[in-house]
Amino acid sequence: MTTPAPGLPSVDQTVLDHAPAAIWMMDGAGQLEFANRHFCEYLGIAQTRLLAAPRYTELMPSAMGAAWLQADRECQAQAAPHMSMEWMPLADGRQHLLELTRQRLLNPDGSVRGIIGLATDVTERSEYRQRLEHMAHYDLLTGVPNRVLLADRLAQALARAKRERGLTAVCHIDLDNFKPVIDAYGYGAGDRVLLEITRRIKDAVREDDTVARLGGDEFIVLLVGLQVTEECVGSLHRLLQGIQQPVALDGEMLCITASIGVALYPDDEQDAETLLRHASQAMHLAKEAGRNRYHLFDPASDLRARSHHRLLQQIRHGLAHGEFELYYQPKVKLHSRRLVGAEALIRWNHPQLGFLPPGEFLRAVENTELEIELGDWVVATAIDQLRQWRQQGFDTEVSINISAYHLESPGFVTKLKDRAIALGSVDELRRLQIEVLETAALDDFARIGALIRDCRALGVSFALDDFGTGYSSIAYLSKLDVDTLKIDQSFVRDMQDDKSDHAIVQGIIALARAFGMGIVAEGVATEGHLQALLQMGCEVGQGHGIGHPMPAAQLPGWQMAAPRA
Ligand code: C2E
Ligand code: MG
Ligand code: MG
């Protein structure tokens, strides 16, 4: 290359030839005055030919020439550098992305003298960027959108559902038995299975829908443009069907199934993140229900679950802040009307809701750790109360209600004993009775029997509460060596009018006698009840007709009112 660069007299041609860009210069009429090596190579035209042509753009492929000419014209018309990006066919026959910068050159009189231009081939850079972008948005293995792109698609889907007043289903798919496949066949085989499953998922849904992979064997499918729930159900069945077809692997047929959790917008009117969480919760319910099925997230039952959760939190808080209190309901010898003991009944002084009976909150803690904590509090409070009363010279017995779950929880007896020792009240255990619900004791006779014996060794006695309301009462009376039966108040209430209730009360009293147990009638609400029970041979009673449950401080001074004349 010998042509000096006109207008660039001090720059050696070879320097420009080695620049990693195409450089050219033209005059105002469109004839090239200079072209470096890259420029000629891009076009695949010899430099001499290029420089000899009156209009170099006419040597280019026609579409390229037209675009080039257009850009030259625009550049000549503006003072600022002209920048553009163009896909152009180059000498290798492929399309290249060129980044072009042109600057017009002026004569001293201000007329346009020509253009100097620079073109860089950025094809590779842009392909690389695209690859990076693809990697950032698509799952490497399956090529479907990843979590990042899913977020985008979900936002679009929700906007569309809003606009069209349609439905969007967010489906969380988790394969049921994928891990054993990897364990048995290795990761490579696992990948092949995932590819096949991805294909089937894509086949089961529509073009508009999104299939995304979260990683592992978890996918999210967005079903869009739905009008009614049934449409979604159809797709779910197709998904389950498609996935559960046997997959061929190393000459074997594998059976893979999936559990799908679905959150349906706007039935579940939540933001994207919450919908994804709900779909995942529902997926776990589908697993629990036996796998290879779908479960629709139910906003109403979720609300119930959450208010249940809130109640538990409040109870925990209340327990820590002394909001619970034991009330004591007197038990009397029916013939003398003298106090023989009291049943401790839990109450909640709720800061907002007021004074709550156990029916309002005990159900919530059933079979939870909190039930045990609450029960432990009852045990400790009752033992301490007995100790305080004795110090005041008031000697009585107290029965506490203990749930079967608590009773059967590990270490119950040890805790009871330790509690009594810690409170310095081991003697108090002789005045303590544990009431167990009849039905509750049914589970495991051997265990409960052993428990009763261990507690009795500490001096604690046992009563079966609400007797007669459970089942097979007589059968297990012989197995459970309890001290007392408490006749349920429902029989006592109606026994004077209802012959069968009367017979039941009589039967229970006879039963207690036969087994050598004490008997307490609950729900003694009237003088009539009291007299009838006395006649039947029941010795002890408890009920509103005798005395209501009351704060601990009132019990020592309490006396049963004399019967009205
Ligand atoms: P329960 O052990 O059978 O206690 C007797 C219930 O009958 C008490 O209700 C008492 O207030 C009520 N009652 C007493 N006399 C009469 C009457 O003449 N008529 C009527 N209609 N009712 C009467 P409360 O205190 O609401 O307790 C309900 C149940 O809650 C108890 O039944 C017991 O199963 C449970 N409970 C109470 N306190 C505790 C506790 O500290 N721990 C546990 N696990 N359960 C408890
Ligand atoms: Mg009771
Ligand atoms: Mg009862």
Image (cartoon, rainbow, N blue to C red):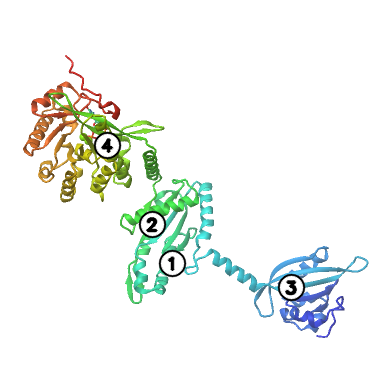
Q: Quadrant of the N terminus?
A: bottom right
CB contact under 8 Å: marks 2 and 4:
no
Image quadrant in which you'd find residue 123: bottom right
Q: Nearer the viewer, mark 4 or mark 3?
A: 4
Mark 1 touches mark 3? (CB < 8 Å): no
In 3D space, how far apart are the residues under numbered discs 2 and 4 (Cα atoms)? 50 Å
Q: Is residue 168 visible?
A: no
Q: Earlier in the sequence, mark 1 or mark 4?
A: 1
Q: Quadrant of the C terminus?
A: top left
Q: Which residue is mark 1?
A: 199
**Cα distance in 3D space between marks 1 and 4:** 66 Å
The residue at the point 82 percent across, 78 percent down is: 34
Disc number lying in front (1 or 3) = 3
Viewer-proximal residue among 235 and 180: 180
Which amino acid is tagged 1?
Arg
Residue annotated with mark 3: 119
Q: Is tag 1's residue or tag 3's residue first in the polypeptide sequence?
A: 3
Q: Which amino acid does the dot numbered 2 rest on?
A: Ile
Question: Of callouts 3 and 2, which one flags the residue occurring earlier in the amino acid sequence?
Answer: 3
Whether disc 4's CB lies below 8 Å from ligand 1 is answered no
Q: Which residue is at the far bottom?
A: 2
Residue 473 image point, x, y percent: 13, 41
Q: Is residue 422 left or right of residue 49?
A: left
Residue carrying label 4: 382
